[in-house]
Image: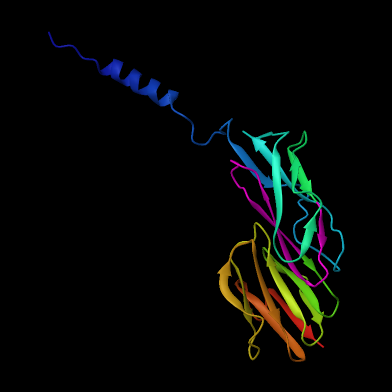
């Protein structure tokens, strides 16, 4: 006599399906690094100034991970950190304080935690000398500030922070600068120096145009 096991097969398949891992769930053992709140990213100050702390947060399976080491380093530009390593607190937060160097320019700092997803995290800061150096943050949907003024020979740093997506800088004709026409995601920095007097307008071609949307200008005096 021929027997059917169709019902048993269906039940077995359902059991296997239910026992599988849920790809949309949180891995309770996964260590992750994110920016703190506030993170302190994209700060400015005069040369030799001490800035507010940079901050990251470590979580394991979505829960704050305390007592873990975070290593900090200045990876470009001038400046010093108050600690090479800090330990996460009960909220999973670790921080470091940057003192800017003696000259104007962009400083990049990284925070690293071994084995953490999202590590390292990058922070930007700028030492600004009025008239000589200015910074524009390339944010989602706008430039901040939209208008900056510098002296002839000055430099403007355009900084894409972490989380900024699909932005570029296109000069409004007849100007040929500032220009970074490749669409970029943050973190990214582009510096441009200006050697002639004038007003230099620009826009993001993804989110604006020469007359509307995401645009800004540099006034050189």
Q: Quadrant of the N terminus?
A: top left
Is residue 14 found left or right of 182 in the rendered image? left
Q: Which one is nearer the viewer's eye here, 40 or 17?
A: 40
Residue 119 rendering spot, x and y as whole percentages:
62, 48
Q: In this figure, what is the number of numbered marks?
A: 0
Is residue 205 found left or right of 143 in the rendered image? left
Residue at left offset 76%, top offset 74%: 146
Quadrant housing residue 58? top right
Task: Please tell me whether residue 101 belongs to the stretch shown in magenta.
Answer: yes
Q: Which one is nearer the viewer's eye here, 66 or 216?
A: 66
Residue 6 rendering spot, x and y as whole percentages:
25, 18
Q: Which one is nearer the viewer's eye here, 85 or 219?
A: 85
Residue at left offset 84%, top offset 54%: 52
Is residue 155 found left or right of 181 in the rendered image? right
Task: Please tell me whether residue 48 belongs to the stretch shown in magenta.
Answer: no
Q: Which one is nearer the viewer's eye here, 15 or 36?
A: 36
Q: Quadrant of the C terminus?
A: bottom right
Residue at left offset 29%, top offset 16%: 7
Name above or below for residue 113 compared with residue 106. above
Residue at left offset 34%, top offset 23%: 13
Residue 44 rendering spot, x and y as whole percentages:
81, 65
Scheme by which the image is coloured:
rainbow
Name above or below for residue 26 compared with residue 3. below
Name above or below for residue 105 compared with residue 199. above
Residue 75 rendering spot, x and y as whole percentages:
68, 60
Task: Specify the segment rendered in magenta.
Answer: 97-125
Quadrant housing residue 73? bottom right
Which residue, as the protein is rendered here, is positioned at the far left? 1
């Amino acid at each position: 006599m021929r027997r059917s096991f169709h019902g048993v097969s269906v039940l077995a398949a359902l059991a296997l399906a239910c026992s599988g891992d849920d790809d949309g769930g949180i891995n309770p053992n996964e260590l992750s690094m994110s920016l703190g709140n506030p993170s302190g990213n994209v700060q400015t100050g005069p040369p030799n100034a001490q800035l507010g702390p940079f901050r990251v947060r470590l979580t394991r399976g979505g829960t704050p991970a305390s007592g873990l080491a975070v290593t900090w380093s200045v990876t470009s530009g001038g400046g010093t950190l108050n600690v090479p390593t800090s330990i996460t607190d009960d909220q999973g937060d670790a921080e470091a304080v940057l003192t800017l160097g003696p000259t104007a320019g962009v400083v990049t700092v990284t925070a690293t935690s071994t084995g953490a997803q999202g590590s390292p995290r990058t922070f930007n800061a700028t030492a600004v000398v009025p008239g000589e150096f200015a910074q524009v943050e390339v944010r989602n949907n706008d430039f901040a500030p939209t208008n900056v003024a510098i002296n002839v020979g000055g430099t403007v740093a355009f900084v894409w922070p972490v989380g900024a997506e699909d932005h570029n800088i296109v000069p409004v004709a007849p100007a040929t600068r500032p220009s970074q026409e490749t669409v970029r995601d943050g973190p990214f920095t582009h510096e441009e120096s200006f050697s002639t007097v004038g007003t230099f307008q620009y826009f993001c071609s993804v989110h604006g145009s020469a007359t509307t949307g995401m645009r800004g200008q540099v006034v050189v005096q």
